[in-house]
Image (cartoon, grey):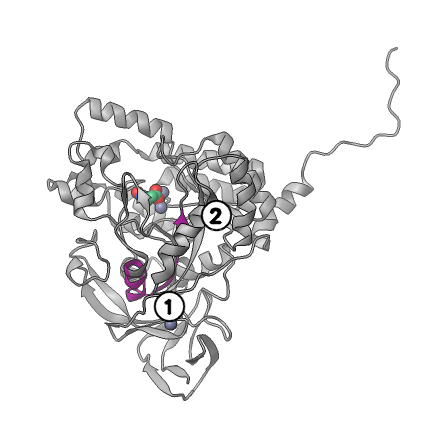
Amino acid sequence: MSTIIKGGTIVTADLTYEADVRVAGGVITEIGPDLTGDEVLDASGCYVMPGGIDPHTHLEMPFMGTYAAETFESGTRAALSGGTTMVVDFALPSPGQGLMDAIKMWDNKSTMATCDYSFHMAITWWSEQVFNEMKEVVDRGITSFKHFMAYKGALMVNDDEMFASFTRCAELGALPLVHAENGDIVADLQARLLAEGNTGPEAHAYSRPPEVEGEATNRAIMIADMAGVPLYVVHTSCEQSHEAIRRAKQNGKRVWGEPLIQHLVLDESEYQNPDWDHAARRVMSPPFRSKLHQDGLWAGLQAGTLSVVATDHCAFTTEQKRMGLGDFTKIPNGTGGLEDRLPMLWTKGVATGRLTPNEFVAVTSTNIAKILNMYPKKGAVLVGDDADLVVFDPEKGKTITADTQQSIIDYNVFEGMEVKGLPRFVLTRGKVAVMDGEMKAEAGHGDFVPRKPHQPVNRALSTWKELTAPRRVERSGIPATGV
Ligand code: URP
Ligand code: ZN
Ligand code: ZN
Ligand code: ZN
């Protein structure tokens, strides 16, 4: 049984060409002209691209006294409906909990996933047990470790813990990730704002200015450099942070930045909305920024100083957001975007001429597949690779509304916005999950994707560090002491 994707234009991160694609047994088996097979999907007028990979989701995450309401089933269904065929979620041990124990919990949650997935591991506390278990985590195929520099008193780790963990990542050939905001300063600003009577959601943005993000990004970059390990900075939202990443890259450090589709499209004026629910639904960290910051992020994607567009999909219902009525620090932080990332980036990025279709594929799929060592199984259109594909119709449009979305959340932060560019078909390991707009995702179809450590992307910097490490000079003729 083979499926032919017929008459489309293949667009990858580096090539655009016309060809049919044969899919059988979950993988791509042939690419070429005039293919025939059992089932034909008409891709005329469409781009055939690697399915999107969202490396930053929090499905069913316990956070701020509640759980993210989006489940692995509904979240991955939402992903597929928008052309994303893989997510990387964060296994999050509570402080004091073992890492392998957290993996068990995430294994249980993810059994209903409709598309493939992988995990990052969060380092939320530090001990000999955590140090030892990091090796077991890597052996399980989880080779990236997230560190929260914010959320003081909950998930935040301090510099000494971060340096120890980064050093361990270097030894294990793994990649550290950071949520870069100075948690001490945020906590202080929050207390001051509340004391002054600033209790509404707009104060959330005032408590997390771009400077706290820029400072933490710089610090994390320097700590990673001292540990001799590359660094991935999640949800880069402002010029201060982007500037630190840009400078690091220019200085030969291996650092990647990840803007979110929400930050690229929505700005800080959302928090001034007189409707409390409207503003609270958009509370996330870092908060939305001004147009100036947004322009910088778009330029970074264009220039290659920023590498990946993600969502940080962490979706709470309106009822959950209302936990913060009267105290903005209690509004669960997080917004959704899984379903809209590709259509929105196409509409605001490709259709406006800011990104080429090939750059679009790079920042939604291929770059992260390479950074996380999943390429070309994921992120490519090549014979032998997983048939995770989106057949994307640039002429198909819609108005985004929560009424018709796959996500189970009762609102959408992009409500009322028009997108042009939508999937006609989406395939997850060869299975058609979206058939001309009809949702056919199958709960439990998704598989865990293990990743390997010590790949060139991990090793390059440590090799350079080793070569240039301080060395004692061997001398033959040492002068006698005394005169
Ligand atoms: O506000 C956010 N971003 N919530 C999710 C957790 C995180 O910080 O990534
Ligand atoms: Zn974060
Ligand atoms: Zn996150
Ligand atoms: Zn299946």
Q: Is residue 281 left or right of residue 158?
A: left
Percent from the top left, x then y, of residue 377? Answer: 49, 66
Q: Position of residue 55 (x, y in %)?
A: 40, 54
Mark seen at residue 445? 1
Which image quadrant: the N terminus? Answer: bottom left
- Compute the Cα span from label 2 to label 1: 24 Å
| Occupied quadrant, residue 39 | bottom left
Which SS class for mark 2? helix
From what the image shows, is residue 144 above or below residue 433? above
- The answer to whether mark 1 is within 8 Å of ligand 4 is yes
Residue lying at the far top in this picture: please name it: 483
Residue range in magenta is 74-91
| Residue 270 can be seen, yes or no | no
| Amino acid, disc 2 | Met
Element class at badge 1: loop
The amino acid at mark 1 is: His
Which residue is rendered at x = 19% and y = 31% of the image? Answer: 327
Residue drawn 36% across the image and 55% down it? 109
Residue 100, which numbered label?
Answer: 2
* Nearer-N-terminus badge (2/1): 2
Decide if residue 256 is on the left or right side of residue 350. Answer: right
Which residue ends up furthest to the left in the rendered image?
274
